[in-house]
Amino acid sequence: MSQPSQLHENKPPVYPEVNYLNADRGVWSWLTTIDHKRIGIMYLISVMLAFLLGGIFAMALRVELLTPGPTIMGANTYNRMFTLHGVVMIFLFMIPAIPGVFGNFLLPLMLGAKDVAFPKLNLLSLYLYWTGATLVLAGMIMGGTDTGWTFYTPYSTTTPTTLFPVLLGIFILGFSSIVTGLNFIVTIHTLRAPGMGFMRMQLFVWAIYATSIIQVLATPVIGLTVLLVGIEKVGGFGLFDATRGGDPVLFEHMFWFYSHPAVYIMVLPAMGVVSDAIATFARKNIFGYKMIAYSSLGIAFVGFFAWGHHLFVSGQSAFNDGAFAVISMLVGVFTAIKVFNWVATLYRGAISIKTPLIYICGFLFFIVFGGMTGIAVATVSLDVHWHDTYFVIAHFHFIMVGAVIMAFLIALHYWFPKMFGRKYHEGWGMVAASLIVLGFNATFIPQFLLGNAGMPRRYYMYPERFQALNVASTAGASLLAFGFLIILIYLIYALVRGEVAGDNPWDSRGFEWMTTSPPPKHNFDQTPIITQDPHSYQEPGEEVEHVVI
Amino acid sequence: MTALDDLMRRLLFLPDARSTFAVPVDRLHFFVITVTMIASTITGLLAFIFFFKYRERRPKQSTPVVVPSVKFEFVVIGVPLFFFLLWFVQGFQDYVWYTTPPKNAQDVYVMAKKWMWKFSYGGEGPNAIGTLHVPANRPVRLLMTSRDVIHSFFVPDFRIKQDVLPGRYTETWFEATKPGRYQILCSQYCGTWHSQMWGEIVVMPGPEYDQWMIEQKRGLSERVDTGGDDGPSFHGSIVEYGKKIAMAQGCVKCHSLDGEPHIGPTWLDLYGKRELLESGETVAVDEAYLTDSMIDPRGKIVKGFKPVMPTYKGRLAAPEAAALVEFIKSLRTQNLETVPSKEAIYEPAKPAPRK
């Protein structure tokens, strides 16, 4: 098989008559499919619904915070609302979003494989996700949980609200995550096309690989932890209950042992998306390929030993605080390596400014600002003031929204033609992207300042001096929401009426573009043979300048 | 320098720096945040400039292969690492200083519960709910514990924060630099009114504070205990305080401390036991049961005992009852954890006061 760009050259774009979307028909064929692409699409619909739900909660919270006193809801409703915002966004959206949707859809395509290693297990992971999600939502309907997504004991073991279905849901969602991770690891090891060594894999694949390792190793710990909370609540064994000789801080350690690496489950795939998209839109091989690939593994590794920075004010020893602080900073170094390499990839490229690039520009700013404020809160003396304030909320959202959701949107726009064979409206794309980058800054920069001013997180009512910044943040959030609405409209329009994209509208040399868009049911008509590194934009035999900087 | 500090504080919406810890924290904050803003702006701008400078000029344009030199790799690893470690070294030094209270600090006990702060002073000082009086320019150490869930003691103007945990004591300290009133906020989510769990620190000039303390003590000695929430304060540990109360209130006339049978159940290894009641039910002896039994002693009589204990309702202030519970909890033997022996130790108590 030849390189991607040479497919269908000089022909008008055609929509493949038979593809994975129409090869089999009927709802049943979707629900029982073992095609990784269809599973990816079902993940896409599911996580978008979760995102919508989490977004509605977020807007409700922002509206409530417009005034220092009660605005539209009571204290208990507010407490349930921020818990559900956190639980839905993290467990139902962030964690499965990029691996579940784009990992599933693209990994086999990028490897030149027909499917993932265990297609049935793949379908199982989706059903586990649905089961877990249903339980979480059931808990919500049965009255909701008010513990915050962190479930700190002994509050969570004594709250009168409905905790059980939510915890069980998270337990099951964990299995979905483990199964997906395991499947991807085996796929990457066993199903690479002939000619593709590890050092020829696309960086998105490397990122997914690092992510999967964390999913497999860390997720059992959260399962164990919520199980222990359940046992504690039902049996009263006193594991975390100080009045029975337990230790509430033990829960914090166990919780963050998963939940800190979980941040990298969310952000590593985002970094992978950017690495691939930036190469395509700059028409350049990625600068410092090995450094980016290894830094993903580096983040996955040190990410396991950084959890204690969530406990700087918990009464843990100063020595531990210092050790966790230094380890946390290494994550910053690995991230900095990636950022330098992304920017350097743009240098002397042939850049076409398309919608994903607007998000990439935003992403680069957000990840540096969000990452370095992470270093700031890892600096122990500074964290004392910022801990549990809006500063941490803003830092966290800079990474989670600023980096991960930007990357999700980059992926959605960049691979939309791959998935559906159609183009969205570029003009509207640009408008929405600008609105979102702007709205994001307007939402979260005031929150950094709120944290400086000393407003703690999870505050239903607040002293009046914090009002101006809260109003600013809510205004920004409305802008953000408006941007998402525009995207929803033009993407749905593009699905139905969009211009036919052709197989490789971006003229990318990523391996996923070797086949038609949308791809046929079994991805490739014949097994591709890989003869070049990914994103080599030279024609075979072409002499190009080599530059060392 | 201070003018610049104040300008930065205003730009960053920071509250005034009113403790000795706040000043070095703010300086490092300014350094870190300035570098962060510069670095992120340069990155975003550089990408933006590249978009236009290196835009695609003709379709299928070929691009040079650009690879990093070893020097480049050293720079991208070295420069961030240099800054990060610099901040760490400075920040950790300040932090170690902050986590080491000076020897001459005055102690105040802090008890947090949903949704209030209680303060009691050592040296027969007063108790207070919500308001903590401290002297300016003298170190004050806070020994803190929680009665229910995790709270966190946060004073933005002092830049200090410390989680307050049930079942153990955590400590923090500060030296306020200017008289005034400063808000205390709870920063660890603790339920419905977490956002209203506020208190206030009143910082007074040293001499004024001393005068205030003398007046408080005089007021206390004249005061008739109304059985309100404010009991007298105590020296030393809460357990010792509980023991003192047990002697003063005559608890030990009926409850032995060494496992010997007596009029009431012995307190040795009482806490954590499961008791069989006259009603046939069993009850776990926990804080709730012990406190209930002080207020309503005839509600849950242990099988084999007579309902002879008078109520202590109105005779024990809440901190005193808590201290008693802590004292009872401290009376433990090694073999507590083995279930059968628990019963065996207790069993001999039965025949003694029987009808």
Image (cartoon, rainbow, N blue to C red):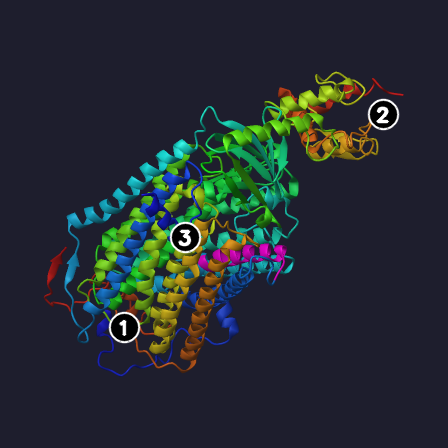
- Residue picked out by circle 1: A506
Q: Pick the quarter of the image with the C terminus of chain B.
A: top right
Q: Looking at the rendering, which quadrant does residue A350 occupy?
A: bottom left
Q: Are marks 2 and 1 in contact (CB under 8 Å)?
A: no
Image location of residue A458, percent across then percent down: 53, 52
Q: Which residues are magenta?
A: A73-94
Residue B232 visible? The answer is no
Q: Position of residue A248 (x, y in %)?
A: 55, 38
Residue A483 shown left or right of residue B297 in the figure: left
Q: Label 2 amino acid?
A: Lys
Q: Note whether residue A543 is visible.
A: yes
Check disc 3 and report its element: helix, strand or loop.
Answer: helix
Residue on which disc 3 sits:
A395
Left or right side of A205 for B52 = left
Q: CA distance from mark 2 to mark 1?
A: 89 Å
Instruction: Say if A331 sits above or below A366 in the image.
Output: above
Under circle 2, the secondary element is loop
Q: Chain of mark 2?
A: B
Q: Chain of mark 3?
A: A
The type of residue carrying mark 3 is His
User: Residue B324 colored magenta?
Assistant: no
Q: Position of residue A7 (x, y in %)?
A: 24, 75
Q: Residues within 10 Å of mark 3 (few under 14, many from 20)?
A: many
